[in-house]
Amino acid sequence: MATLDRTPIWNCNWIKDMSFFHLIQATLILLYDNGCLGYLPPNFATFESWYDRINQTYVDRTSITPAMALLLFSLGFTHKPRGLVVICGCYQGLAMNFILAGLIAKTAHKDFPRVVALDIDGAAIERAHANSQSLGLSFVEFFHDDARSWCAKNSESISLLYLDLDDPYRGKADYVTIFNLVRSEISPGGLLLAHDSESPVFTKDLDALKTLIVQSQVFSHINSFPVDQAGLLVAIKSTSADPLLRCPRSLPNHLNLSPVSQRLPHAE
C-alpha cells in the first residue's frame, strides 16, 4: 500500500470543511484566467476517485502528502500537453501517478503525450512500473538511468518536467543541472515542477534553481506552493512575446504564496 494518510479522504484534517481544496482551486482558476493553464481545475469527486485507486498501490515510503497529491493531480488536470512528460526521480511512481491521473481524467487517453520516467534506483523503477501497470498506465516508458545523462541526449520538446532528485552528497543540486540541460526544450506553456521547494534542508539548491528560472526571463509564472513541509515550485514557460505580461507573478495570499523573485533579493 502507498504510505499516504490512510484516513478516508473526506475526513483528512488537511481538507477540513473543503477549504484547502477550494484554495487550490481558486489559485489555479486565477492562473487559468490569466492564460497560464490550459484547463480549469477538476472537481473534488474526480480527484477523490483517483486518490483511492493510487492509494492502493505499493510504496515503501514517501514524502508525498495528501495535500501534495491534490496539487499534483490538479496541475496534471489543468495542463495542456505540448510534448514529452518527463519525470526525473520517479522513485516508485507515486507523484508521477497523481500527475498522470490528472492528465488522464481530462483526456481519457486521447492525444496523450509520451511519458518518460527516470530513476537510478533499479528496484524503485521496477516497483514504479508495476504500480503504473496496476493503474492502467501502461504507456509510461521507464528508464533505469541517470536523469542528467538522459536529459543531455534528449532533443524532443518537453511539456511537463517534474524534478524530485535527491543525492546523499549533492542534495538537490542536480535540479540546476537538469534545468540547464533542458531549458530550451521546455515548450511554451510548459510546466516545470520541482519538489521540496519549501524544505529548509534544500534551501541553497532550490534558491539556485529559482534564481536561474527568474534570470532566464522566459517563465511567466514562478511560485512556490507551501501546501506541506516539502512544497512544490511551479514555473510556467511563457507563451507570449513578453513573458512578464502573460501571467501574474503574485497570487492571492490564500496559501501564503509569494513570488519567487520577491524571495530572492539578488534576482532582477
Image (cartoon, grey):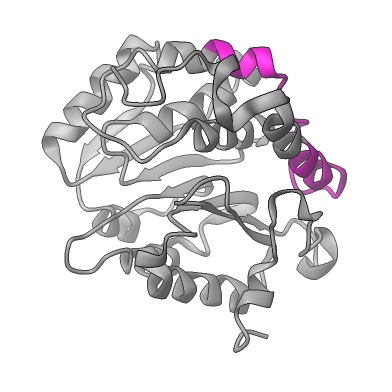
Q: Residue at x 48, y 28 (%)?
A: 98
In this rendering, the answer to whether 25 lies above or below 264 is above
Residue 102 magenta: no
Quarter of the picture holding the N terminus: top left
Which quarter of the figure has residue 224? bottom right
In the image, farthest residue toward the left: 123
* x and y percentages locating residue 55 in the rendered image: 39, 17
In this rendering, the answer to whether 170 lies above or below 28 is below
Q: Residue at x 42, y 60 (%)?
A: 199
Q: Is residue 258 left or right of residue 112?
A: right
* x and y percentages locating residue 147 in the rendered image: 28, 53
* x and y percentages locating residue 145 in the rendered image: 19, 47
In this rendering, the answer to whether 58 lies above or below 184 is above
Quarter of the picture holding the C terminus: bottom right
Q: Could you tell me how many numbered marks the image carries? A: 0
Q: Residue at x 71, y 25 (%)?
A: 18
* x and y percentages locating residue 3 in the rendered image: 31, 26
Which quarter of the figure has residue 53? top left
User: For this rendering, which residue is in front, 252 or 74?
Assistant: 252
Q: Is residue 38 visible?
A: no
In this rendering, the answer to whether 195 lies above or below 238 is above
Q: Is residue 74 visible?
A: yes
Which quarter of the figure has residue 233? bottom right
Which residue range is magenta in the image?
Answer: 26-49
User: For this rendering, which residue is in front, 52 or 236?
Assistant: 52
Q: Residue at x 78, y 31 (%)?
A: 40
